[in-house]
Image (cartoon, coloured by chain):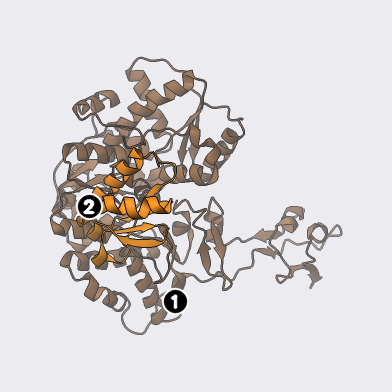
Chain colours: A orange, B brown
Amino acid sequence: MTITICIGSSCHLKGSRTIIQKLEELITERQLNDKIELNGSFCMGECSNGVCVKINDELFSVSPETVNTFFENEVLRRL
Amino acid sequence: MKTTFITDINKIKFEVNTEVARLAFAGELDEKANEIPYKLIPGRTPHYRCCVYREREIIRERVQLAMGRSAMSGQKNKNIVQVIEAACEGCPINRFNVTNNCQMCMAKKCLGACNFGAIKFEGGHAVIDHKKCKECGKCAEACPYNAIADLMRPCKRSCPVDAITMDEDNIVVINEEKCINCGQCVINCPFGALSDRSFMVDVIKLISSGAPVYAMVAPAIEGQFGPDVSVGMIREAVMKLGFRDMYEVSLGADFVSKNEGQELLEHYEAGEKMTTSCCPAFVSLIKKHYPQVLKYMSTTVSPMTATGRLIKAMHPDAVCVFIGPCIAKKSEVIDSITFGGADYAMTYEELASMFEAKNIDPEECTETMQQGSKFGKQYSVSGGVTAAVLETFKEANKEVELKVKTCSGAQECKKALMLLKVGKLPEDFIEGMACVGGCVNGPAMLGKSRTFLKDRNGQIAKADDRGVLENVAQYDEYGINMTRNHQ
């Protein structure tokens, strides 16, 4: 599975870096490093819905506050 | 500052980037981006193409790239290097052509060599029927007079990983699974039909937001902004743009030399080979085309990541922007978001446009600085990484008898990696750089002629002779992690 996080300026200001760190922590905690790849991306053009995060090609709106729920509900379910 | 350009394509790219930067600094980009094609291509007389409408469409696509988007809307491609479709002339040349050297000989080896019945004889010489020709090249190999010329399209010829194909209209297509973003096609297409996406607007927006944005300039910087413009002067100019400060990536390179040296000794003592990991196109070449040898690649981070980690250790909120001669660094940023190093990567070309947009002239600056050792500064030249790693042995009074393969350019890298893959590489260490001559010949250099190199060498000669290890030791308190895994 590839999780792509928008690193455009708008998403950066909304906390994309924190989301990357938290996802990395959650992935390491559950030893899923072999199964999940984290990648960055240029602006996805959905700035008003940022931070934009894609699981494969499916787009989600995630914030530093919702990243744990996002991981539990959306990421783990798709593995 | 008088800006000179390698070709008119570089000039057009500069003009587009400058307009985009100007509007981004003014906060007017979204409303006024559509005006750029009319501003740059006024009137009715075209300069390079069939009509002004096509020229404006090319500018429009270039504006998209400068804004970090795909050149064509609706494209989902993630690649850094992208096709500007309107700029591609679809090079209508047929790859193999019979030249005047054809002697209409008796042996007719071309005829025998062709498996597709594409060779005919008309008007006293051989002729290739291009409807039947499969471009296998057997006829050209067979001709005893070298009378058959191979006119491969420049984009395809320049690509070291065979990532360039054509669509049904002969327009260039990049196979992103294969592409290593080395940028060779960008500098080799004579019509400028390939170019790189930019993070420049993101960087300008972050600067305007008041975020603490730090620039990190790659070691090829000396001489790029004028014969007498030193790194210190560039730092002053960069800070006038709104960056909080500027660091030299040659400093991070010193960290890499120390760490990679230790790693190399361990490999050497265990009888294992090792490759460098600082050139992002070389790293992609290994990952995408020689995954079997990935285990030999140094696990040391790149000088870019090392510098970014150091800046973040000193300033935890820092947004780190790499600025270099390299297109592939942009893909390194995207692939290494978990490394905690650089947040964005830009090019010297884009930095020059930002200076122009803000009317800042580095030549008018006066400051001085030096952070990297001379060895760190030479990371941008083929052989420079090896010299720096060996220097760390010398400084630590270690004697190591290493055999090194210095690969200058992707073709040499491929040969060495192939030998490594089949276990026949005689050397112990591969230094891989995807650009011939190293980063100083990178695709986004502002100038790479002899004059530029002379200016560069002149400036580096003025740097002090600090040792690599003593330079790194100054930052010991920060305990910078130098491995690729973040933790």
Sort mark 1 into few (<14), some (14-19) or many (20+) by Cα contacts within 10 Å. Answer: few
Name the spot of residue B44 as percent of width and height, x first. 36, 85
Q: Is residue B403 left or right of residue B313?
A: right
- Say which amino acid is labelled 1: Arg
- Say which amino acid is labelled 2: Pro
Disc 1: which chain? B
Q: Is residue B338 above or below residue B473?
A: below
Tell me which residue sits at (27%, 45%) in the image: A22
Tell me which residue sits at (39%, 76%) in the image: B57
Q: Residue furthest right?
A: B106
Instruction: Give the number of the mark in front: 1 or 2.
Output: 2
Name the spot of residue B74 as percent of width and height, x first. 41, 71
Secondary structure found at label 1? loop
The disc placed on residue A64 is 2
- Asked if residue B435 can be seen in this view, the reply is no
The disc placed on residue B140 is none
Labels 1 and 2 in the same subunit: no
Name the spot of residue B151 as percent of width and height, x first. 62, 61
Q: Is residue B425 above or below residue B7?
A: above
The image quadrant that residue B30 belongs to is bottom left
Quadrant containing the C terminus of chain B in the rendered view: top left
Residue wearing tag 1: B49
Quadrant containing the N terminus of chain B in the rendered view: bottom left
Q: Who is closer to the viewer here, B16 or B365?
A: B16
Q: Is residue B227 left or right of residue B416?
A: left
Q: Who is closer to the viewer here, B88 or B454?
A: B88
Name the spot of residue B14 as percent of width and height, x first. 31, 63
Disc 2: which chain? A
Q: What is the spatial separation of the Cα atoms under label 1 and label 2, in whole angstroms?
A: 49 Å
Q: Is residue B198 above or below residue B212?
A: below
Q: Is residue A76 left or right of residue B419?
A: left
